[in-house]
């Protein structure tokens, strides 16, 4: 691709305006993030459930080990890409959200990207680390406006970039709060990105870069996003089907095998829609048969499994997917999963996208 926008996120400017989206549990760990950062993109570690296969995790010390595992993951991705830009994705919906944010900042991460809820208090948790750039994920201008107003009033700072994630195509928790939003054009990148760019220019009178996420696969998708006014793209699904992705090969094989009929949107235990692969576990859930492993650690602020057992422990199901357990895992994936036909290397993807 000839001319790429410059994506400046606070004090950090990756060589290319490409962010690898945080994918939990451990789909984007230190290995994937380090590999992306080494190629010149922003490599993002998903903070959720990092404890799950840590040698010191006993089953009772989940939150403490999450914190330790976070510091180790940041260190290890930094070692892989000493000059690269490393981010951590922290979900607001997690009980240990503030601890995760603090430990990521203390571990020296460059950027914290935060969604699955509105990150209203994010600047408070990183107050002692002014170099850490803060990036909310939103799916509407209304959400961005709420964050900008609150941050301005309470902390005197603006987001360093804003990711717009469209529920129409993204994987995992897709930025929608209601099922109707998943197919609503009002949440398309075509609608939200230009509207947000205009709002930032005219109302906020600032230069906050907007990053487009959801359904980005190739150069033409990137061009389309940049044409809408985005200065970066965030890509999840394509990076999950790489050699460097931290998940088990059976997770990646499920991506390679998936066809259009295998992609579904379910109501997750968090109470928001999530896009995933249709496997035996999801089939049972859809048909009303709830099967769950026990609660891992009360890791969510709002969890319908913990409340009334009406769903399942999502952390356990995501850990199972990471380990490649097709029968019991929740395999999050974006609509682009149908384009995964083989395992790619991160360097190949960059070569194709940036033309070097
Ligand atoms: C397997 C998987 C897990 C994900 N986990 C998270 C997560 O932990 N936190 C988050 O904010 N977004 C998560 N996402 C969303 C991605 O970061 C990204 O924004 C989205 O997938 C972009 O759309 P794409 O997959 O079409 O490229 C996940 C996506 C996938 C596919």
Image (spheres, rainbow, N blue to C red):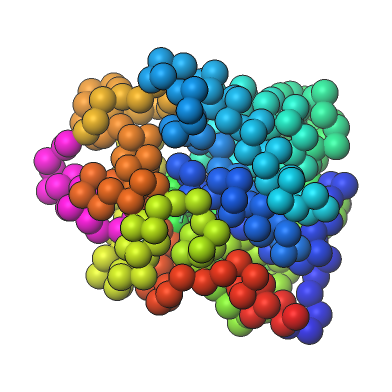
The structure residue drawn at horizontal position 59% and vertical position 51%, both measured from the top left corner, is: 31
Asked whether, in this view, residue 287 is left or right of residue 161, the answer is left
The structure residue drawn at horizontal position 21% and vertical position 49%, both measured from the top left corner, is: 327
- How many numbered callouts? 0
The structure residue drawn at horizontal position 62% and vertical position 57%, both measured from the top left corner, is: 20
Frontmost residue, 215 versus 109: 109
Quarter of the image containing the N terminus? bottom right
**Residue 288 in sight:** yes
- Image quadrant where residue 225 sits: bottom right
* Residue that sits furthest to the front in the current view: 55
Q: Residue 131: where, in percent of width, then height?
A: 85, 37
Q: Residue 155: where, in percent of width, then height?
A: 80, 27
Frontmost residue, 281 versus 228: 281
Q: Residue 18: where, in percent of width, then height?
A: 69, 64
Quarter of the image containing the C terminus? bottom right
Asked whether, in this view, residue 97 is left or right of residue 294, the answer is right
The magenta stretch is 275-291
Q: Residue 95: where, in percent of width, then height?
A: 49, 23
**Residue 190 in sight:** no
Asked whether, in this view, residue 53 is left or right of residue 216, the answer is left
Instruction: Report if residue 222 lies within the magenta region.
Output: no
Instruction: Report if residue 279 lies within the magenta region.
Output: yes
Asked whether, in this view, residue 6 is left or right of residue 81, the answer is right
Frontmost residue, 60 versus 220: 60
């Amino acid at each position: 691709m000839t001319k790429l926008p410059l994506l400046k996120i606070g004090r950090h400017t990756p060589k290319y305006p490409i962010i690898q989206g945080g994918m939990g549990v451990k789909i984007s760990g230190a290995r994937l993030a380090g590999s992306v950062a080494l190629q010149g993109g922003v490599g993002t570690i998903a903070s959720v459930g990092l404890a799950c296969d840590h040698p010191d995790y006993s089953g009772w010390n989940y939150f403490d080990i999450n914190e330790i595992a976070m510091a180790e993951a940041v260190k290890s991705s930094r070692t892989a890409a000493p000059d690269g830009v490393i981010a951590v994705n922290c979900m607001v919906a997690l009980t240990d959200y503030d601890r995760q944010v603090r430990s990521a900042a203390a571990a020296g991460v460059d950027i914290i990207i935060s969604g699955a809820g509105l990150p209203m208090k994010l600047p408070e948790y990183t107050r002692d680390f002014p170099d850490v750039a803060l990036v909310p994920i939103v799916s509407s201008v209304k959400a961005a406006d709420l964050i900008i107003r609150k941050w301005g009033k309470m902390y005197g700072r603006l987001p360093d970039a804003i990711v717009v994630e469209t529920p129409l195509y993204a994987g995992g928790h897709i930025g929608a709060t209601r099922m109707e939003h998943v197919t609503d054009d009002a949440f398309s990148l075509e609608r939200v990105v230009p509207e947000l760019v205009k709002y930032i220019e005219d109302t906020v009178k600032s230069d906050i870069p907007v990053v487009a996420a959801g359904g980005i696969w190739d150069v033409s998708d990137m061009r389309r996003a940049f044409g809408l006014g985005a200065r970066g793209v965030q890509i999840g699904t394509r990076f999950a089907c790489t050699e460097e992705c931290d998940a088990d090969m059976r997770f990646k094989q499920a991506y390679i095998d998936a066809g259009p009929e295998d992609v579904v949107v379910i109501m997750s235990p968090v109470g928001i829609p999530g896009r995933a692969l249709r496997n035996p576990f999801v089939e049972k859930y859809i048909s009303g048969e709830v099967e769950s492993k026990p609660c891992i650690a009360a890791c969510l602020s709002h969890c319908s499994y913990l409340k009334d057992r009406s769903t399942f422990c999502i952390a356990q199901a995501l850990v199972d997917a990471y380990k490649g357990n097709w029968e019991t895992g929740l395999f999050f994936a974006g609509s682009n999963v149908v384009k995964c036909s083989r395992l790619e290397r991160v360097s190949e993807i960059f070569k194709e996208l940036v033309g070097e």
